[in-house]
Image: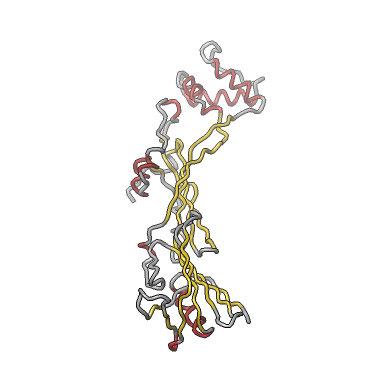
């Protein structure tokens, strides 16, 4: 006999919820019963429950539409004397005694976990705090960087217009730029939230064309971060030379992706925010909407 597979599940309970085994009916009054139930939440993906039903193949096939509409995943095995269906549901709102009850997917509370990660990136030598401090002592900070870059590109013909005893770092920068070194390795912190939903919740909304940045307090309040996460979020550095002009230390969402966990028929959403001195020319800060 064949094995029938699809990806969702939901039967209608017509017997007392406290009886075991529980009797169900489907189209035309065809009956089947629940013969097993297993709870699982130990793999970090959130709660899911696997039911086993036994009945005629017609009853199980007819019930499969209800299972699908309820956001479940099922398999029907018709090889034995009594066909059996294995049905998996997931989600925090799931009623174990009435798994096919109608639910509003927008009211579901996801199971979430948080991760802080350190990213290592290459940053311009001009971003070094002591370099920026020296640049601010020049007539014009922009002219300082332009002169250093020009001298680094062609040291023979472009001499620095500043005395070496007053601006020693500029001459050090020229040496490094002339040999091709224009960056250094630095790091920044990212916060990731991984949320698990039932399959009744789909992909995230279309992201905005222009992203916004948020201070830590606003980001935490908008997303309901727990206190344990808020206390670990980094703060802006005290040294003003680490904050370039027209930037603010804030959080920018750098990832928002979703994946379907076939085993449990759950949706896993992965959101990442990165903390850095973001340019206010490109990103609005703490927008109202």
Residue drawn at 51 percent across, 26 percent down: 128
Q: Nearer the viewer, residue 280 or 198?
A: 198
The answer to which quarter of the image holds residue 206 is: bottom left
Q: Nearer the viewer, residue 31 or 236?
A: 31
Give how far across and how far down residue 270 sits, in percent.
49, 52
Residue drawn at 42 percent across, 62 percent down: 91
- Asked if 196 appears above or below 76 in the picture, the reply is above
The answer to which quarter of the image holds residue 277 is: top left
Give how far across and how far down residue 222 sits, in percent.
35, 48
Q: Nearer the viewer, residue 8 or 155?
A: 8
Q: Farthest residue toward the top?
A: 165
| Left or right, residue 225 beside residue 123 | left
Q: Farthest residue toward the front?
A: 20
| Left or right, residue 20 beside residue 123 | left
Residue drawn at 53 percent across, 27 percent down: 126
Residue drawn at 55 percent across, 82 percent down: 82
Query: What is the tally of numbered marks visible in this picture?
Result: 0
- Asked if 163 appears above or below 157 in the picture, the reply is above
Give how far across and how far down residue 35 sits, in percent.
48, 75
Q: How is the image coloured?
A: secondary structure
- Asked if 169 appears above or below 206 in the picture, the reply is above
Give how far across and how far down residue 282 sits, in percent.
45, 42
Q: Locate the N terminus by quadrant.
A: bottom right
């Amino acid at each position: 006999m064949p094995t029938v597979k699809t990806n969702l599940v939901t039967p209608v309970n017509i017997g007392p919820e406290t009886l075991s085994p529980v009797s169900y009916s489907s189209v035309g009054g065809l009956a089947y019963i629940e013969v097993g139930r297993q709870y699982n939440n130990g793999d970090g993906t959130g709660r899911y429950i696997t039911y086993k039903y036994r009945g005629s193949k017609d009853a199980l096939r007819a019930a499969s539409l209800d299972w699908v509409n309820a956001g479940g995943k099922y398999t029907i095995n018709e090889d034995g004397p009594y066909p059996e269906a294995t049905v998996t549901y997931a989600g925090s709102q799931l009623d174990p005694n009435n798994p096919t009850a109608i639910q509003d997917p927008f009211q579901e509370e996801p199971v979430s976990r948080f991760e802080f990660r350190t990213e290592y990136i290459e940053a311009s030598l001009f971003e070094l705090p002591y370099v920026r401090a020296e640049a601010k002592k020049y007539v014009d900070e922009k002219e300082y960087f332009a002169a250093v870059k020009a001298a680094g590109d062609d040291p023979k013909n472009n001499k620095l217009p500043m005395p070496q005893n007053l601006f020693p770092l500029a001459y050090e920068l020229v040496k490094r730029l002339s040999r091709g070194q224009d960056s250094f390795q630095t790091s920044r912190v990212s916060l990731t939230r991984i949320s698990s939903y039932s399959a009744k919740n789909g992909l995230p909304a279309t992201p905005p064309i222009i992203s916004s940045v948020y201070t830590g307090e606003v980001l935490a309040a908008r997303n309901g971060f727990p206190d344990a996460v808020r206390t670990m979020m980094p703060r802006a550095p005290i040294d003003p030379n680490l904050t370039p002009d027209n930037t603010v230390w804030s959080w920018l969402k750098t990832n928002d992706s979703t994946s379907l966990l076939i085993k449990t028929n759950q949706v896993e959403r992965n959101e990442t925010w990165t903390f850095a001195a973001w340019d206010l020319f490109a990103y609005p800060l703490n927008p109202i909407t």
